[in-house]
Amino acid sequence: MTDFTVGDDCFRLDGKPVRLLSGALHYFRVHEAQWEHRLAMLAAMGLNCVETYVPWNLHEPREGEVRDVGALGRFLDAAGRAGLWAIVRPGPYICAEWENGGLPVWVTGRFGRRVRTRDAEYRAVVERWFRELLPQVVQRQVSRGGPVILVQAENEYGSYGSDAVYLEWLAGLLRQCGVTVPLFTSDGPEDHMLTGGSVPGLLATANFGSGAREGFEVLRRHQPRGPLMCMEFWCGWFDHWGAAPVLRDPEQAAGALREILECGASVNIYMAHGGTNFGGWAGANRSGPHQDESFQPTVTSYDYDAPVDEYGRATEKFRLFREVLEAYAEGPLPALPPEPVGLAGPVRVELAEWAGLGDVLEALGDPETESGVPPTFEELGVDRGLVRYRVAVPGPRQAYPLGASGLRDRAVVSVDGVRAGVLTEESGTLPEPVAGPAEVELWVESLGRVNYGPRLGEPKGVTGGVLHERQYLHGVRARGLRLGAFDAAGAVGAVPFGPVEAAAGAGDAGRTGLFRGTFTIEGIEGTTGASATSAAPGASGASGAPGVPGVDHAGLELPGWTRGFVWVNGFCLGRYWSVGPQRTLYVPGPVLREGVNEVWVLELEDAGEPQVELGPGAPVETDAPGVVQP
């Protein structure tokens, strides 16, 4: 039986000192049929371990509806086949720039500020979830012949709270559920974070992007003995909609990695391969020194300026990291697997059919509710998607300003069927006053829930009220359209599509809606790209599609379109938004089909010409302007 332990100065495997050279790769951000290739890229870079979070909300979006926890087990099996150890970070909170920090909406909506504390009701649902999930980990611990060597208790808790009772209970729960490998915590290298987030008897690790010597000095003040480890070496960063991209100079990042290793420490490169926030699962942040100011939604790409880019390709950062890591390898590094091949040429997809948002809501929406005040998304059970609110302005009355207080996040507003404006949290009043009587309709979208800081779990929707002058408008009808409603097989078949020309004659209603079209792809015989490598057993992927020979990926663009979501063959690629910086959505090759393929575009603001463009995707990043958070 293999034994992995935490020694006084290093990790030990069957008594022998080992250094963990790990890289973060989240199974839920990579199509399952591509896991094998991405794990091979990590091994070729010189890593001996892979780390992954587990997003509770992906696996239990509604209470009691647990979905495919076996995906974690299959990923860990794939890591083992790739010759990598595995670090598992099951949360229940994960941050990760993921919707709501991985906490389900039904949890934060019910418990509010009681989450991540000793609250008995919160602990009860966490325990139920862990007892459902953790057998996937326990069965694959290194002592049972599997790859799992470390498991994290909570995540960066010192950046949020100081409830030692909760942390010690959670560590005990992990042990009760059968986790026998060492447990650890991870926090920023600051005194208040380490005192708030550490647990006696558990290994404390630090998260940072530079300044390893200084960071480890702080860690040593709190943990005089035990192996040093940077659990998150931030080698890049993530992007927000409407902001400039953030990139990190490869040589500077390689130098920071070298400094960590020169300290004798282990490392987890965050991210080794970032992947994609498919399905609208991207999170959000708040700006400011305490993360409680303006709203900053995260883009669909989670490329992270990582050494293995979103498309699975080696970057200059990969080559420099490989040079650094090679010096610490026990033997020659594996060769790189074949580089993924993109779609050979451009493909224009004509969107020939259209259905208005109202018709889509009738076909796929939840039942409409009526109440005195606007219900939040949480109260309606909507995690990702939008809600239509309808309310009447009594009359007769003169024109007054009309707006929404506590709006999260963005609302397209019509008055008597005519577009009146777009409201946001920062700009919550229509540009022109509204007289009564009038019928007001607000289509409100959540742009992603905050995943870090004190605003974690804040509700979405019209969280205050609809105001006419100072008067609240009551008697609000609300109906949710969840992105998950599009997932069911054949669900979109219930939408009453008509010819796309009908959108042009529908007035303002034609500016939004669900558009549909098809395109054809032929395979490329005799290719040697990543698609030519054998897939792991059971790795058919979420779509069940076989893919197209010689095509490992494509890039999809929507010039002239504004904001919404795109599906290819029923697989949701994520959000697009003309504010940038992201212009191209990543299309995994396994989603494509040889022959006829189908595209849906759900436009929520202003549609462009009824066509989208597919091509080989974004090029490999070759330079690194910009800055990275240290």
Image: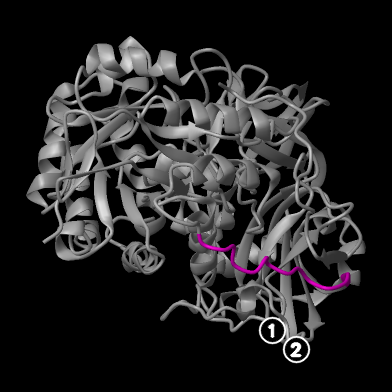
Tell whether 49 sits left or right of 597: left
In the depicted view, which residue is nearer to us: 394 or 51? 51
At 80% from the left and 44% from the top, the residue drawn is 578
Residue 504, located in which quarter of the rendered image?
bottom right
Residue at screen point 32% across, 21% down:
158
Question: Where is residue 256 shown, x and y percent of the image?
Answer: 54, 27
217 up-or-down from 265: above or below: above
Is residue 21 left or right of 114 when viewed as pictured?
right
Q: Which residue is painted at 66% across and 57% down in the image?
A: 313
Q: Type of residue at label 1?
A: Pro
Q: Nearer the viewer, residue 397 or 320?
A: 320
The local crowd at label 2, few if under 14, some if 14 to 19, many if 20 or more residues have their Cα within 10 Å, is: few
Q: By what rule are the colours in the image chosen?
A: one colour
User: Tag 2 or tag 1, which sits nearer the N-term?
Assistant: 2
Does 56 sit above or below residue 437? below
Marks 1/2 in contact by CB < 8 Å: the verdict is yes
Mark 1 or 2, which is nearer the eye? 2
Query: Looking at the picture, how far across and down is residue 206, in whole percent?
Result: 36, 26
State the residue in front, 582 or 402. Answer: 582
* Dot 2: element: loop
Q: Which residue is mark 2?
A: 525
- Quadrant of image for the C terminus: top right
User: Gap in Å between the C-alphas at discs 1 and 2?
Assistant: 7 Å
Q: Secondary structure at mark 1?
A: loop
Q: Amino acid at mark 2?
A: Glu
Write the start and end of the magenta stretch as one range. 334-347
From where the camera sits, is residue 385 visible? yes
Q: Is residue 366 visible?
A: no
User: Residue 231: where, in percent of width, then height?
Assistant: 38, 34
Residue placed under numbered mark 1 in the picture: 549
